[in-house]
Amino acid sequence: MQTGIRNCSVGATVSRNSHNMRVIVAAAIFFGISPFSAAAVGQSETTASAVGPHGAALKLALAGSGGAEGAAQDHYQDTAYRGLWIGPAGDDQRARALLAALESAGAHGLPDGKYHTGALRAAVDAAAGGDSALVAVAELALTRAFLTYADDLSYGVLEPGAVDRDIHVTPPVLDEALLLDRVAAAGALEPVLRTLAPAHPDYARLVDLLARLRALTPDAWGAPTPGGASIRPGESGPRVAAARARLVALGDHVEDPEAAALHDPAIYDQALVSSVRAFQRRHGLNDDGVIGARTLEAMNAGIDERIGQVEVNLERLRWVNRPLGKRHIEVNQADFTVRLIDDGATLFAERVVVGSRRHRTPEFSDEMTHLVFNPVWHVPRSIASKEILPALQEDPEYLSKKNMRLVSRDGYQTPDPAFTDWTLYSAADFPFAVKQNPGGGNALGRVKFMFPNRWSIYLHDTPSKRLFAKDARAFSHGCIRVQDPMRLAMALLELQEPNPDALIDRVLASGRETTVRLDTPVPVHLGYRTAWVDDEGRAQFRGDIYGRDARVLAALRAAGVAQ
């Protein structure tokens, strides 16, 4: 965008001064700075005082902002209007360093057009002439761009809850005053810039992966494998040859040229099976070596799709750029896994079942405060009225068979279920609560892990283990079922109990509902990560089970993030 800013020198002729005024006003208007304040400085040398001509110009420009500059205005006032980006002698090294960072913002999956780097560079070039008003305009414009960039890079471009109603994540608020003080105290800007992005190792790895994906040509991964029936080890045909070529292009299958010349690429041999199984593992699929629909879908994902996934996951890491807790629990809904992490080390990792597409598990963080062994299941009202009532209408003995009982709600007398005409009730007027007693068939299994929240979401055991064998495990009503939950209970209690296995055995044997409180609450983070790079340098991708990636990506594109 043309701003009309050019290099100019101070005061030579009336004509040149007039030109300066036009440049000052044009630049000020572009950056949203009061043109009248900026132009007034250019017309009067009497405003220069103990703060110097540049400081006087900056003071007057800030006065014209009506306090809109917030923390920046306070900072400049507290520092006698010393420039952050352009020194009194025209030193603009910090300004140039900031411009370089803004121009590379796209490498982080940020909307680089948002920071008006072309106009900013023109403003800095114009300020090099020494005109105090132009210096003031450039100074304020650079500060605004820096704070916007710092907020985007640290805590994200988007408001998570505005993108998806199931994302209940509140990014931290940028401490603008502290950040400006750090810039002022730093000799060079680069060390400050390096602290802005999330320090989580996954972030830097994803930035590197994004650069590598963007460097690929559109046809780098070759042709997709045609659809059709599942391909099993030992089978042959042109689709096997296509899958082999695709995995070679993706880097998941390496063939020695001499060995490759000796066998038929259309035969699904053991070497290719091993590569397919490794590919399945890095995509969160069961590594059975069968090229089925899910494996084929992951194999045929395009470069642009993967770039979008990485951009979305960079944004997600920015949303949670805060301490997660020395000891904490992470549930990755897209990966269907839970991990207990202590000081960076994974103490427990296991498969989970999350909410179905109809009953999506929300994203949020809270603190686990206690465990309940032999839990009573307080059946949610929606399940009682929409699922248990129809079951009772089919079989009045349903409750006794499931070890359930009716509980009075709102003063209703509890009837004998076996002698009640349940067809008289509907989901809208079902007046009873339902509880399931502890026992082998209890839907919560033998233990639940409580982190009280407004969605009544928790982790729990389950008597039905078969779903853990599936690769896509979205089947619950929203709560999270854990495979091998007793091992998680042991890991949580070992810090406070000298013999946690004996405690667990004792309370389970009692058959009574028993609460065990954690001495120190453990943060729990229910997240949704579909792309990361593992410790061995392998890019990991997962499916977008709830469609959240698609919504976040659309919002990023609307915000100006380029592919």
Image: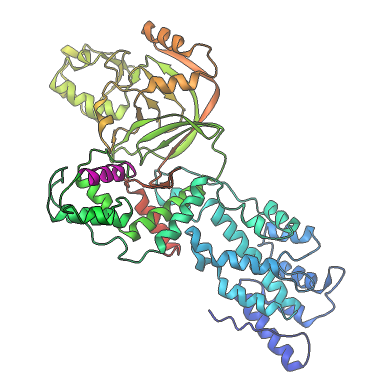
State left or right for residue 251 relative to residue 206. Answer: left
Could you say where residue 352 lies in the image, as x and y percent from the top left?
34, 31
State left or right for residue 48 relative to residue 509. Answer: right
Quadrant of the rendered structure where residue 446 is? top left
Question: Residue sitting at 51 percent across and 18 percent down?
Answer: 494
In the depicted structure, whether residue 472 falls above or below residue 115? above
Residue 410 visible from this viewpoint: no
Question: Residue sitting at 36 percent across and 55 percent down?
Answer: 306
In the depicted structure, whether residue 270 falls above or below residue 102? above
Magenta span has 276?
yes
Most common secondary structure along the magenta stretch: helix
> In the orientation shown, which residue stands out farthest toward the right?
50
In this view, the residue in front, 452 or 124, is 124
Q: Which segment is the magenta one?
A: 270-282
In this view, the residue in front, 32 or 227, is 227
Q: How many marks?
A: 0
Question: Residue sitting at 72 percent across and 91 percent down?
Answer: 16
In this view, the residue in front, 344 or 142, is 344
In this view, the residue in front, 384 or 441, is 441
Residue 296 visible from this viewpoint: yes
Quadrant of the rendered structure where residue 188 is? bottom right
Quadrant of the rendered structure where residue 443 is? top left
In the depicted structure, whether residue 188 falls above or below residue 485? below
State left or right for residue 154 relative to residue 28. Answer: left
Image quadrant holding the C terminus, namely bottom left
Could you say where residue 389 lies in the image, as x and y percent from the top left?
21, 24
